[in-house]
Amino acid sequence: MSRRKKFLSALVSSGSAKIPVEKTGLYVKPYEVLCDCIERGIGFGIRRAYKYSDKPTEESFKEEIYREVLNAIFEYFDFIEPNDKQ
């Protein structure tokens, strides 16, 4: 695991990702974090598609990749519904 991934994992698991960036001096590069999530999700999705079948269907590939990309994104990003109050 790279230093960047270890740092992001520690940041998220410690709960400090909820601290406003202005107060920490930490600058997050959301595009890079999102790209990393997508790359990892694609890899996990492909491995998961092959987990139960030697010849997964195209639909199986799409479903597993989609699910794993979203799982990876939700590890690092919280989404607030427009009607939710903070």
Image: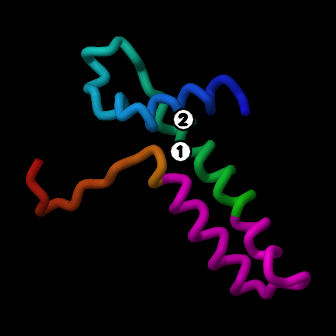
Q: Is residue 4 left or right of residue 54?
A: left
Can you name the residue that lies furthest to the top here?
A: 25
* Vertical side of 68 occupied by 36: above or below: above
* Vertical side of 59 occupied by 24: above or below: above
Residue 38 lies, in percent from the top left, at 61, 53
Q: Give, as a three-letter code, the residue at label 2.
A: Ser
Can you name the residue that lies furthest to the right here?
A: 54
Can you name the residue that lies furthest to the front here?
A: 14
- Would you call the spot at circle 2 few (<14 residues within 10 Å), some (14-19), or many (20 or more)? some
* Vertical side of 68 occupied by 28: above or below: above
- Quarter where residue 66 is shown: bottom right
- Quarter where residue 44 is shown: bottom right
In the picture, the quarter occupied by the N terminus is top right
Q: Nearer the viewer, residue 3 or 34?
A: 3
Residue 39 lies, in percent from the top left, at 68, 50
The residue shown at (71%, 28%) is 2
Magenta segment boundaries in residue numbering: 45-73
Q: Tell me the SS state at disc 2.
A: helix
The residue pinned by badge 2 equals 9
The residue shown at (80%, 81%) is 52
Residue 19 lies, in percent from the top left, at 28, 27
- Would you call the spot at circle 1 few (<14 residues within 10 Å), some (14-19), or many (20 or more)? some
All told, the count of numbered labels is 2
Q: Which mark is residue 56?
A: none
Q: Tell me the SS state at disc 1.
A: helix
The residue pinned by badge 1 equals 34
Chief secondary structure of the magenta span? helix
